[in-house]
Structure formats: C-alpha cells, structure tokens
C-alpha cells in the first residue's frame, strides 16, 4: 500500500535526511549525499536503492556516478508541512 511505502521510506532518519537533501538540491550524486550525511557511500547506496525500490526516487547515470532525484515534488511539500507541525508542537 502506498501509505506503508511512505512510512517505510521516512522511518529511517538517514532516508528522511536523503529525501530532504534531494528536495533542496535536486539531482545529487551518491558521493555528495554520503559526504553530506557523514556516512559511507555503500551505506548511502543501500538507502537510496530502497528509496528507488519504494518508488520515491529515480536516478540517471552520468559515468562514473549515479545522480538521484525525487520522483514527486510533493515529497518536499510533505516535509515542509511536517516541519511546521513539529515547530508548532514544540511551542506548546
């Protein structure tokens, strides 16, 4: 089910952070994502493959690297709404 896929995609802080990066930067290399998150490229690749398998990201190969990007701009909108809600909850 789509809602379960979304929950699985953002359940991990690493994957959530990756989606944030792709929302802000657009198409980004695995190397740049791993560097930004302070993780190994192999770990970043595994998370990105899962996001790809779940249908949230796509990629294009520009030898020698893959550049990932969001398939749906609404993912970024979802995070912006989520962040607003979290900020409001912290004020209470």
Image: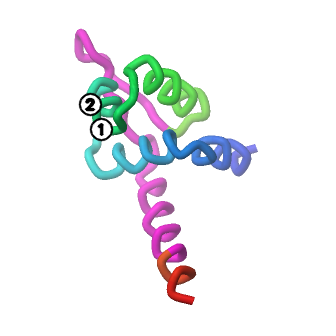
Position of residue 81 measured from the top left corner of the image (x, y, whole percent)? 49, 70
The magenta stretch is: 57-86
The answer to whether 68 is drawn above or below residue 24 in the figure is above
Q: Position of residue 52 (x, y in %)?
A: 52, 29
Residue 41 part of the magenta segment: no
Front in this rendered view, residue 11 or 38: 38
Q: Quick one: SS at disc 2?
A: helix
Task: Kindly identify which numbered label has been placed on residue 62.
Answer: none
**How packed is label 1: few (under 14 Cα within 10 Å), some, or many (20 or more)?**
few
Quadrant placement of the N terminus: top right
Mark 2 Cα within 10 Å, few/some/many (few <14, many 20+)? some
Q: Nearer the viewer, mark 1 or mark 2?
A: 1
Vertical placement of residue 18 versus 42, above or below: below
Write down the residue under mark 1.
36
Q: Determine the residue positioned at 44% across, 41% down.
A: 71
Looking at the image, residue 67 sits to the left or right of residue 51; the answer is left
Are the two marked residues, 1 and 2, in contact with CB atoms closer than 8 angstroms? yes
Seen at 48% across and 54% down, the residue is 75
Q: Quadrant of residue 54?
A: top right
| Residue 78: in magenta span | yes
Relative to 73, say whether 27 is above or below.
above
Q: Which mark is residue 32?
A: 2
| Residue at 56% over, 35% down | 55
x, y (%) of residue 48? 48, 29
- Furthest residue in direction bottom, as rendered: 92
Disc 1 element: helix
- Give the total number of marks visible in the rendering: 2
Q: CA distance from mark 1 to mark 2?
A: 6 Å
The residue depicted at 53 percent of the width and 46 percent of the height is 13
Q: Position of residue 86 (x, y in %)?
A: 53, 73
């Amino acid at each position: 089910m789509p809602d379960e896929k979304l929950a699985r995609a953002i359940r991990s802080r690493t994957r959530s952070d990756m989606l944030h990066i792709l929302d802000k930067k657009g198409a980004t290399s695995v190397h740049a994502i791993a560097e930004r998150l302070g993780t190994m490229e192999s770990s970043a690749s595994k998370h990105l493959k899962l996001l790809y398998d779940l249908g949230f990201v796509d990629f294009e190969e520009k030898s020698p690297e893959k550049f990932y990007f969001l398939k749906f701009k609404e993912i970024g909108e979802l995070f912006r709404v989520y962040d607003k809600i979290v900020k409001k909850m912290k004020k209470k």
